[in-house]
């Protein structure tokens, strides 16, 4: 494919984000700010699984969760800078999300907690996201060359 259909792909990605946000609001009752915070913390605290072949192979599927020692803390300051939010508001929201079990407070910041057994609130979310990625793959395969 020499020329990517950027408008098509962009439209699908925006739909994907919108559906993701709707899913999170309906399933977990998150506000849009909480969704943004969880996305930033999850992305940063689990970054290594996307860059380390061993971690990807060992923890990238539905087997064992990424151990805490491979999850890096995300500071309040980082979240504030990334989202352009006020420090105190962000700190309160992070604390609330940690108290509700959606994030884990550790030395240096917050992480996504290990998702295991009954504590795995992200299983349905992961299934939803994978279905969306498969949908995008199907659409891309149908693009005329």
Image (cartoon, helix red, strand yellow):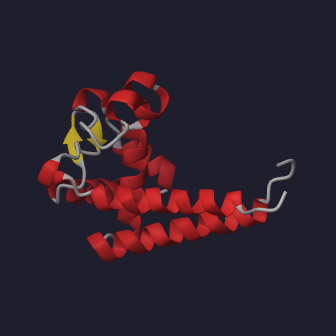
Q: Image check: 26 left or right of 121? A: right
Q: Position of residue 125 (x, y in %)?
A: 35, 60
The front one of 58 and 105 is 58
Quarter occupied by the C terminus: bottom right
The front one of 40 and 133 is 133
Q: Position of residue 50 (x, y in %)?
A: 47, 34
Report the residue at 36% width, 69% height from top: 24
Instruction: Give residue 53's quadrant in the image.
Output: top left
Report the residue at 77% width, 65% height from top: 7
Q: Position of residue 98 (x, y in %)?
A: 20, 53
Q: In the displayed structure, would residue 121 be above or below residue 47?
A: below
Instruction: Give residue 88's quadrant in the image.
Output: bottom left
Instruction: Give residue 138's quadrant in the image.
Output: bottom right
Report the residue at 46% width, 61% height from top: 131
Q: In the displayed structure, would residue 75 be above or below residue 83?
A: above
The front one of 125 and 71 is 125
Q: Is residue 31 visible?
A: no
Q: Image check: 72 left or right of 121? A: right
Q: Is residue 51 visible?
A: yes
Q: Position of residue 111 (x, y in %)?
A: 29, 42
The front one of 131 and 55 is 131
Residue at the far left: name it: 118
Report the residue at 15% width, 56% height from top: 99
Q: Image check: 131 left or right of 45? A: right
Number of numbered markers: 0
């Amino acid at each position: 494919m020499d020329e990517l259909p950027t408008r098509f792909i962009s439209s699908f990605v925006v739909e994907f984000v919108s559906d993701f946000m709707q899913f999170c609001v309906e399933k977990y009752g998150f506000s849009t700010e909480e969704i943004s915070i969880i996305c930033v913390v999850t992305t940063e605290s689990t970054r290594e699984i996307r860059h380390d072949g061993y971690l990807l192979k060992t923890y990238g599927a539905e087997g064992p969760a990424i151990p805490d020692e491979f999850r890096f803390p995300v500071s309040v300051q980082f979240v504030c800078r990334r989202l352009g939010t006020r420090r105190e508001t962000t700190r309160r929201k992070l604390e609330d999300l940690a108290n509700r079990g959606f994030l884990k407070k550790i030395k240096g910041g917050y992480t996504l907690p290990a998702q295991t057994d009954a504590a795995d609130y992200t299983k349905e979310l992961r299934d939803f996201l994978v279905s969306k990625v498969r949908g995008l793959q199907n659409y891309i395969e149908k693009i005329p060359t």
